[in-house]
Image: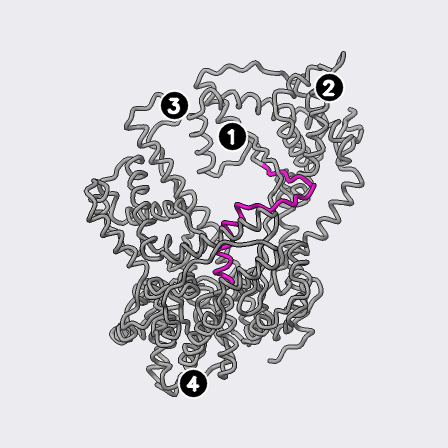
Amino acid sequence: MAYSLADQLKLEHEQLRAGVERYARIQKTYADRGNGSETSYAKRLMPKLVDKLTKRINIEVTAKGAGRRKKFLVHLGQVEASTSAYLALKTVFDALTRHETARKVALAIGRKIEDEVRFEQFRIEHREYWDSIMADFKHKNTTDYRHKHRVLVHSAQQKGLEWDDWGAEARIALGASLLEFIRSETNLIELERTKKNGKHQVYIIPTKEALVWIKEHMEEAEMLDPELGPTIIPPRDWNGTDLYSGGFYSPEIISRTPRIKLHGKRHRKAIEGHDYSVSATALNLYQRTPWVINQRILGVLKDVYKRNLGIGLPATEPYELPVSPVPRELSKEDMTDEQAAAFLLWKREAAIVYTKERERAAKCMQLSRVLRMAERYSKYDELYFVWQQDSRGRAYAASPGLNPQGCDYVKALLRFKKLKPIGANGGKWLAVQGANSYGVDKASFDERLAWVNDNSDAIIRAADDPIGEHAFWSQADNPYMFLDFCFEWKGFKTFGKDFYTSLPIGMDGSCNGLQNLSAMLLDEVGGRATNLLPTTQPNDIYQQVADVALGKLRDSSKLLAKQWLAFGIDRKCTKRPVMTLPYGATRTSCQEYIYEYMYDKAEKQGWGQWTTSKEKFEACRFMSDIVWASIGEVVVAAREAMDWLQNASRVTSRKNLPVSWKTPTNFLVWQGTLKDEDNLVNTILSGRMRLTVYSPTNQIDSRRQASGVAPNFVHSMDSSHMMMTTILMRREGITDFHMIHDDFGCHAGDVDVMNRCIRKAFVHMYSKHDVLTKFKEHVETTYNCELPDLPEKGTLELDLVNQSEYFFC
């Protein structure tokens, strides 16, 4: 069925309405719970109002003269002015959703400020015990004020802390004074006197001006987050200069989905009028690729979720936090050494479980949303996606949740609309897709083909009975993409070269960030490690770093080295530190990745010789030093390039200037991160709030500029490679594209052509564009400065990339 523009506009209107309804639902939930301070309008207003109220409080507290030292001022002076302002306004916003009397609100404000003073004394006198209670609140995601108050009162009493109660009169006097400051300084509230049950009552209500502002804010905010999805007709084409020329059709959504995601007015001004024709051409090719919902995978997903089989999906039951090994009332000072060690270990493991539970809950919400969207869009016989770019040039589908760049089950839910013959060599690439998605992706192509052929019967049985045979396909690294391959493999084995396929076949770069850095520096060592050079077997840089680390352990006489050899390390230990290096990884992040590796491995085999928290920490720190040094031996030149880029950004930062560069596709990248002038209000029981000063800063943040420039530069290069590859593929007759940064896909019968284009584009990009030299020239000319000398280049022969079978594999 062919759909019209009217059908698409109707669909976009539904997406807008769904976003409005979701926004209203969330705000109503906050209001119904009496959490008015959590609404979007309160969060928008609070920083400005806190700033005003803080100034007034400071004036009152510091004022001199007879009669000024009223009782409430004595108490008010015991708390930071910004904290008192935040607590008072938070209480007022919560109260406005409940229509409460001024007396009750004043009492609540006074009580919260008293609690702030009271528990600050507890925190100072028993810091370690206090920290353990706060950690417990965090682990259990405890946010209820009254519960936290009860726990802290009980804990303080256990420690023998006495408190001289302020009394209701002092609390009300303090709260009433703050209410008056709010009324006079902010125009947020006014007093309403009414007679109820024969008694005169005074209520706080929002002013008419505040109600108008809130209404206007909500009408604006509810339109900011439509539930964007795929389109049912091809999106409008982008042109090279107009940021709003393409994509969706309705004006409300067009204004919120520019071709390049902007970072404020300065970014927009910097790129205005620049010609982005090359990247616009590639985006249009992605937008013209038609897709359909994969009904077979959708059916299996729903069945797996219904049966709670948990295959590649988040668990439906929440994680349970481990039980504390010591009684809650026991203070750290009273613990034995053994109890203290057990308690520290429990805190760390509880934090990991807490993090996993938050991730599980988020993934469950994502799964529910994706299934709902897939069900909704399954009635359409073709779908398209609007594509945008971020400030570095990387391309993204504008539909969150359901899009071709999603996780395993999301990608499996989408297929090309067009069926194409598998062709003479397509069967090979179909088999490679199967082996890759299962996890047999480090072997040679011949070995991958052999694995698929050896398991062909099991693959076909999985296609015939996915649920009954789930024990086989559920073990895959990407189970739903592998199951989708199983369906396709059965068809191929039935019809042979006459088989028509719509499964996207992907080719993935080998540690693509380091591939780009090695190419721009002509680094033969890094190039060989990342498969820029021809080999009979694919090189595995993660394993190479692991091998170097193993060598260092064997050469060491330290006990920790022997313990690590017994515990075992492999490519999984080094993968994340190596993979994230081009994107800003640090020694600290390396240590975090090592600990996660330790924890995951220990869940299966136990901790071995490390039993206490201290021993595990020391082992983690020792191994992170080994891995970090091993990375430096394998990817020397890449680190030099990253250091040079950071130093270059510092030169422009010293002049208080941004940094920008043009990519080989003429994409203008602009990075101008400014310092934030803000104040973090961190209250004991009422959470924290970052208050931004409303006078804009013009000071470049040199630290964030330096940390961001290298990863942004690498991302801009991999984006250029993807765009150039796409345009070459189209010239060779390919019309359907499944592109994800460093993972390029097309129909099985087109893979040979795509592989040639991938290599040709990469060689052309780095042989015709000395990207670091051009970066240097552009920055020096644009910002009138002098950058350090570039790192020396190596002897890598770029043309050999054309002969490298495993460059993308």
- Amino acid type, mark 1: Lys
Residue drawn at (22%, 52%) of the image: 551
Is 701 included in the stretch rendered in magenta? yes
- CA gap between label 3 and label 1 equals 18 Å
Which of pointers 1 and 4 indicates the residue nearer the eye?
4
Against 653, residue 291 (above or below) is: below
* Residue underneath mark 4: 421
Of label 3 and label 1, which has the lower sequence position? 1
The residue sitting at 50% across, 67% down in the picture is 404
Mark 3 vs 4, N-terminal side: 3
Residue 196, above or below 714: above
Q: Amino acid at mark 2?
A: Ala
Magenta region: 689-716
Marking on residue 729 = none
Spatial distance from mark 2 to mark 3, Cα to Cα?
A: 43 Å
Count residues near mark 2 (Cα–Cα under 10 Å), then give few for <14, some for 14-19, many for 20+. Answer: few
Residue 699 sits in which quadrant? top right
Q: Which residue is mark 3?
A: 331
Q: Quadrant of residue 110?
A: top right
- Residue 758 placement (x, y as % from top left): 44, 74
Select label 1 or label 2 by which is in front: 2
Q: CA distance from mark 1 to mark 4?
A: 65 Å
**Disc 1 to disc 2, C-alpha distance:** 35 Å
Q: Which residue is mark 1?
A: 148
Q: Give yes or no for residue 142 being in the magenta stretch.
A: no
Who's the residue at 51% across and 66% down the image? Answer: 719
Specify few, some or many for label 1: CA neighbours under 10 Å numbering under 14, 14-19, or 20 or more.
some
Q: CA distance from mark 2 to mark 4?
A: 85 Å
